[in-house]
Image (cartoon, rainbow, N blue to C red):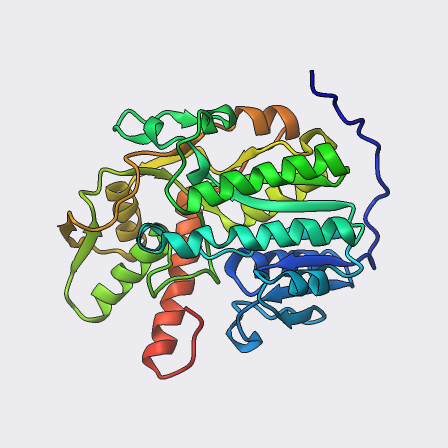
């Protein structure tokens, strides 16, 4: 029988302890840096391979480094002196990207492999890994009778090719670094994060941002039609960025969840057709729908079973989809207008 490691309470995070965020130039990483900064933490290091001017958010008072975290030496540099490490760095995007660039998605395993090792060598107290609902067994997601996926549904393993397998194996790395080396690791399986300041064009955007942009562009060109990937019957849940950040913070600071994968997502399930209808309502239009049946569409249905997170944290993501969509739509509308006016925007 495998011996269980005893959990010893660690010291509380101090305001000047070094927090390292891998992928800080991206949507969630940048938002997390801002959350910590707004909470009064004064020693934050953000790392991303993109040049700093291309980061989604550049938070005042945060040390920003341009480093490719798939390289071991760069991870050592990133984690020097770290007390907490949050790894959100990965090559990813919407289903169009995930299905077409599986090798790039798989190569993200280098990032987490080197980052968890560097965090352990640096003596970090806590290490957070952003996993994904794509780690779940795809055989459970093939028909329209959508079951809410609970944490145990990742096994027997049959993850999303490329991206999902990378996440599942990286989860195992995190679990073994706790079991063998005593690094407190935390694993959240994200379910479709969206919101303002996120990717909204270029092929990596998730469905809420893509639909918002398409509706805005249809209105702008006075051609009230929209192209939908698949037949629109695909079912998903979508988590607003503020809920994601709250969940990451709660999970990483709960010793009940050390080395334990947990769902982090909304349980409000909608079809893609319903998503379009909701955005139309926000925009005050009705569009003619054209379905691209040969486009990437992903699994038939995926939803988050939030039983475990509610039992453990007495909390779950709770921003209503309509509220999050409205904020996202209004922000993307400003970005589309700015781009049309010739201003530089981060897409």
Q: Residue furthest right?
A: 11
Side (left or right) of 182 relative to 174 = right
Side (left or right) of 4 relative to 251 = right
Above or below, 190 against 328 in this view is above
* Number of numbered discs overlaid on the protein picture: 0
Residue at 45% across, 37% down: 135
Q: Residue furthest top?
A: 1
Residue at 68% across, 40% down: 185
- Quadrant hosting residue 34: bottom right
Quadrant in the picture for the C terminus: bottom left
Quadrant in the picture for the N terminus: top right
Give how far across and how far down residue 142 sits, in percent. 28, 30
Side (left or right) of 317 relative to 16 = left
Instruction: Answer whether residue 320 is visible to the viewer in this image.
Output: no
Q: Nearer the viewer, residue 71 or 284?
A: 71
Residue at 33% across, 61% down: 203
Q: Nearer the viewer, residue 188 or 167?
A: 167
Q: Nearer the viewer, residue 66 or 253?
A: 66
Give how far across and how far down residue 80 sits, in percent. 77, 61
Instruction: Answer whether residue 195 is visible to the viewer in this image.
Output: yes
Residue at 47% across, 29% down: 154
Above or below, 88 against 333 in this view is above
Above or below, 264 against 218 in this view is above
Give how far across and how far down residue 41 sits, in percent. 77, 59
Give how far across and how far down residue 326 sits, in percent. 40, 53
- Quadrant hosting residue 274: top left
């Amino acid at each position: 029988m495998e011996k269980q490691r005893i959990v010893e309470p660690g010291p509380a995070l101090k305001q000047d302890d070094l927090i390292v965020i891998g992928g800080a130039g991206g949507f969630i990483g940048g938002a997390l840096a801002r959350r910590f900064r707004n909470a009064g933490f004064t020693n934050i290091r953000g790392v991303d391979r993109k040049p700093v001017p291309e980061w989604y958010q550049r938070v005042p008072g945060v040390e920003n480094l341009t480093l490719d975290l798939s390289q071991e030496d760069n991870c050592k540099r990133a984690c020097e002196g770290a007390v907490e490490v949050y790894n959100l760095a990965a090559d990813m995007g919407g289903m169009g990207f995930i299905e077409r660039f599986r090798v790039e998605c798989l190569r993200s395993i280098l990032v987490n492999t080197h980052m968890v090792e560097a965090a352990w060598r640096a003596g970090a107290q806590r290490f957070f890994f952003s996993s994904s609902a794509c780690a779940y067994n795809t055989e459970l997601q093939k028909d329209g009778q959508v079951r809410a996926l609970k944490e145990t549904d990742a096994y027997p393993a049959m993850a999303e090719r490329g991206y999902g397998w990378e996440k599942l194996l990286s989860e195992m790395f995190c679990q073994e670094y706790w079991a063998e080396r005593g690094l407190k690791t935390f694993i959240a399986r994200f379910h479709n994060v969206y919101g303002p300041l996120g990717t909204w064009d270029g092929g990596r955007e998730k469905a809420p941002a893509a639909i918002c942009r398409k509706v805005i562009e249809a209105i702008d060109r006075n051609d009230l039609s929209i192209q939908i990937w698949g037949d629109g019957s695909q079912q998903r849940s979508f988590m607003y960025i503020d809920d994601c950040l709250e969940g990451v913070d709660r999970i990483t600071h709960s010793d009940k969840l050390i080395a334990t994968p947990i769902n982090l997502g909304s349980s409000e399930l909608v079809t893609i057709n319903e998503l379009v209808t909701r955005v139309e309502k926000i925009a005050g239009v009705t569009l003619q729908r054209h379905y691209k049946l040969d486009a990437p569409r992903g699994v038939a249905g995926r939803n988050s079973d939030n039983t475990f997170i509610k039992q453990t944290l007495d909390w779950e993501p709770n921003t209503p989809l309509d509220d999050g969509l409205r904020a996202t739509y209004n922000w993307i509308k400003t970005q589309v207008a700015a781009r049309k006016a010739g201003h530089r925007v981060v897409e």
